Amino acid sequence: MSTETQAVEAEVKEREPLFSKKNRKLISNPLDADNPITVQVLGVCSALAVTVKLIPTLYMCISVLFVLIFSNVAISLLRNVIPGRIRIIVQLLVVASLVAVVDQVLQAFAYDVSKQLSVFVGLIITNCIIMGRLEAFALANKPGPAFLDAVGNGLGYAVILIPVAFFRELFGSGSLFGFNILGENYPGNGVMMSPVGACIVLGLLIWFQRSRNGYTEEA
Amino acid sequence: MGIVENYLNIGIKSIFVDNMIFAYFLGMCSYLAVSKKIGTAVGLGMAVTFVLLITVPLNWLAYNFIIKEGALTWLNNLGVSTNFADFSTVNLEVLKFIIFIAVVAAFVQLTEMVVEKASPALYNALGIFLPLIAVNCSILGAALFLPGKEFAFGESVVYGLGSGIGWFLAVVALAAIREKLSYSNVPRGLRGLGITFITVGLMAFAFLSFIGFKLPFGE
Amino acid sequence: MSKLNKNSSGYIFGFALLVILVCGVLLSVVSGALAEKQYEERELERKKFILKAALGDKMDEVEKPDIAVMYDKRVKESVVNSKGEVVEGLAANTVKLKNEYKKLEKNGSLKAGESINLPVYEVMNEDGSAVDFYVVPTYGFGLWDNIWGYVALQKDLNTINGVVLDHKGETPGLGARITEDKIQKRYSAGKKIFEGDKLVSVTMQKGEGNDYSSDPHAVDGMSGATLTADGVNTMMANYMNLYLSFINAKKS
């Protein structure tokens, strides 16, 4: 597995001068106009659940990025040999293995964070962004573009999660990255730390993003 | 406390207090996707309830007889000498993600095939939702919560059913609100997803009041 | 879907087997390589909690590698049972509190016929000549899931020197606040577990912002987290009661 993916990464590097306009769009589109969370409505579960504090959120974003890149490239490599009937299960298996690796690594090197994220590391498996990208992109494209697509979508995920966590931690516990910002006397705000705050912050964020880029949904 | 009361308590707790959507945000992607119309919401809600009812006990069996440390002790009784292989020390926690998701995916695929053959009418009603369910976080989430809850087998059945009903309630309630909402004059950027998130936030607010309420059948 | 041979049963089985094999090998390699490090991290956290309960804030400045050294130098581990007798041949770090906790009845007393293993950590003074603090673990249930912690008693086996609390799934911002220093320090202000000879434990009160400095058995509560606080109180009372024979034996 690892030698395979290393080889792929080398291949991508060779092609880097070929960062065509189309390939650049693979990265830039998911950041705004085609954002996985706010436009495609994928991967919302974790966007709401892990964003109480910034530090676990960052770890979550990195984990998702890692799983997304490796699974997208792996499935793209296998795209011509996967039997159609067991496609979904094979994809889930690859993703689940990668997530188990991430979970093991977190337990060994970031024990505190892995305790805080608890079951939500495991739930990366069913993060729809990953399955969505595998189905929609990796199965039909070469490893190079699949890699870029994964990076773009992983970053698109982070671009939403980090602001949500920023506001929730700032107003919920008066701190940022665990450092106290609003003073010792700030009483904390339970609503911001609960599911309610997550939904409302995300809703307002979507409002902000859409009034900026002009995207509207037919109600 | 009698056994029936215990089951009722677990059921009520999993429907209202530990609600998959409002307490943990699990299964949000499909939740948001199908909650535009009550009809589709009822369909997916029923499918999720059914799959949870079956896969939670299945995963309970997998966890307690395969994965957990010492869970494979029963293999020692099959006649293989413990000098050759002592299964009572085997711990397969690292494989739990893969096993859980494999159980879910396999069951969903199986159901799809059986329903298609046995009852075309039911397949038309539920079938289109089944593929969506393998990647519904609430199914895997319920499985991942199992090790922490330490249920007996019967309790896990009730837990699966209760979690499903909780999800069903949440999705039908949101669909009803969204149908009304489509007649309202919502600001352009907030239309669709934005206002839906805020609605879900307010619904979660209401469900917060269930936290810590005294279970009706005694502790 | 495109080519026929890809849909033959043999091909599907072979392919599935291959994928499973690759994933399995990858996972076992990773988990094998990391198992030791994971164990170290868990041990480190346990050691840090024990030392922090006894020594307080200064543990925040101790670097990770030094914690284990300090622990080896200053902490003497033993295991006792509910009668206060030392259980021989059992290492304190192999006692799984989660399993021991199951031996308790709902009201906190020991189930009939069960014998419980209770770890005791004696934190010695700098030169190792005398015991400074007795640290004992506690385990219980909060609002959502298990909670646990360590209580450090001073030499008189009455005054609480400090506590460290942790939890699995309490509500962030409400019950989860038991992990904050601010909450845990409320136990350090000369709170006592005995009233005369009678064990009364220390109880976290309902409501927040009240002054309990005159009451040695009460600490300020956490607003919005009364049920977690109840869990902490039950856990403290249960475990202090289990250690009662040990404490009395040490006192006399």
Image: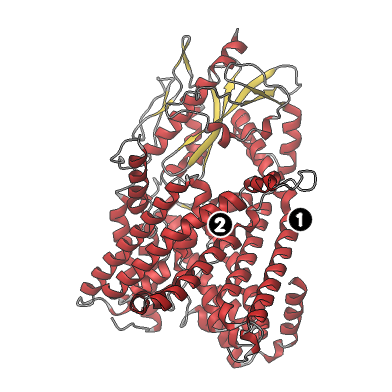
**In the image, residue A96 above or below residue C123:** below
Query: Residue C223 appears at what percent x and percent y?
Result: 36, 39
The chain holding disc 2 is: A
The furthest residue to the front: B79
Locate residue A35, reporting x and y percent: 47, 78
- Count of numbered tags: 2
Q: Residues within 10 Å of mark 1 (few under 14, many from 20)?
A: some
Q: Classify C232 as above or below B197.
A: above
Residue B49 or residue A111, whichever sits in front: B49
Residue A37 seen anywhere in this rendered image of the structure: no
Describe residue B84's horizontal placement relative to residue B65 as left or right. right
In the rendered image, which quarter is residue C217 located in? top left
Q: Amino acid at mark 1?
A: Ala
Q: Quadrant of the C terminus of chain B?
A: top left
* Tag 2 residue: A55
What's under tag 2, amino acid-wise? Ile
Secondary structure category for the residue under label 2:
helix
Viewer-nearest of discs 1 and 2: 1
Image point 46% across, 83% down: which residue? A33
> Which residue occupies 30% across, 69% down?
B42
SS assignment at label 1: helix
Residue C123 in the image: above or below residue B148: above
How has the structure been colored for display?
secondary structure
For disc 1, the chain is: C
